[in-house]
Image (cartoon, grey):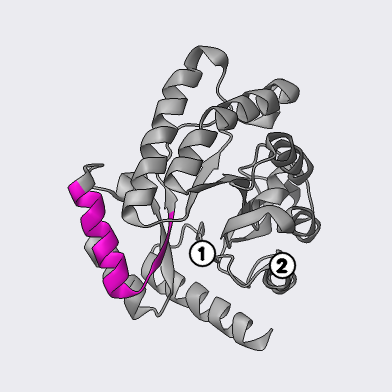
Amino acid sequence: MTLDDFLKRAKQLGVDGVQLEGMHLESYRREYLRSLKEKFNQLDFFIVWSGVSQGISASESVREEVKKNLQINIEAANIAGAKVCRVFGGFSRWDGVNLEEQMENTIATLKSVLPWMEKYRIKIAIENHGDFTSEELVEIVKSIGSENVGINLDTANPLAVFEDPLWAAERVAPYVFSTHIKDFKFVPVLEDNGRFPYGFKVVGAELGTGIVDLPGIIRILKNQSEEIPLCIENHTGITDEDKSMEKCVSYLKELLENL
């Protein structure tokens, strides 16, 4: 799909806005970004910017490069009419990394672009990306101490760091600027005879068909603020992605109506 196709389909599904990745864009030229803003206004869409392609837990040796990438995306988000720019740590906590160092790097990177956030009136939302726990993310946000730095809550990713998604949502809710509304399920990893499980793995599921307590999490977020955007992220691997997304949108609309 082209970006225009995507926006047209989103409007047909009756959503209120979209979250865009950098890969969706034709360019970062100002004229192009202004034309995007016009399209969003015509569609009456909010937009969450997600163009940052590099992890922000960058070591000092590459921090300047990451800082420039952040600056470009903060300015682009402003031109396109976004209020929030989503970022991520960009490491796996299971690769033997020094977590304290990753937290320090993340704090240093974000502090380096605070003047840009203020200049362009953009908030940064750090995603729980299967790297930091909810407790670590809250500690990072508090350490920076800026009202422009918060969290992008992915509702299923707490499972990747062995946290209960509902418990994680409760912890981060006061700091949430944006979301990935997502569901996961556990499936058995079977032996060759297809009978006895070696264990289990976590895979994507359509909203409402997995193990994440989405009603509970959405209720927590709505009690925190009606302004938090609920952006569906679908990781099912289903071939007919359009039909799958249609089901997810329908589920979330019904859930919101019944809260």
Q: Residue furthest top?
A: 61
Q: Main secondary structure of the magenta part?
A: helix
Q: Earlier in the sequence, mark 1 or mark 2?
A: 2
Asked whether, in this view, residue 237 is left or right of residue 148, the answer is left
* Residue under the image location 37 percent in, 42 percent down: 75
What x and y, as percent, mark residue 163?
78, 49
User: In 3D space, how far apart are the residues under numbered discs 1 and 2 (Cα atoms)?
Assistant: 19 Å
In the image, is residue 42 part of the stretch drawn in magenta? yes
195, 17: nearer the viewer: 17
In the image, is residue 197 part of the stretch drawn in magenta? no
SS at mark 1? loop
Question: How many residues crowd mark 2 within 10 Å: few (<14), some (14–19), many (20+)?
Answer: some
- The kind of residue on which mark 1 rests is Ile
* Residue under the image location 42 percent in, 51 percent down: 49
What x and y, as percent, mark residue 15?
43, 75
- The quarter of the image holding the C terminus is bottom right
Q: Which residue is mark 2?
A: 224
- Where are the magenta residues, as a range? 31-48
Q: Quadrant of residue 243?
A: bottom left
Question: How many residues crowd mark 1 within 10 Å: few (<14), some (14–19), many (20+)?
Answer: many
* Residue under the image location 20 percent in, 50 percent down: 32
Asked whether, in this view, residue 101 is left or right of residue 205, the answer is right
Of marks 1 and 2, the one in the foreground = 2
**In this rendering, does residue 2 appear at all?**
no
What x and y, as percent, mark residue 141?
69, 41
Q: Which residue is mark 1?
A: 232
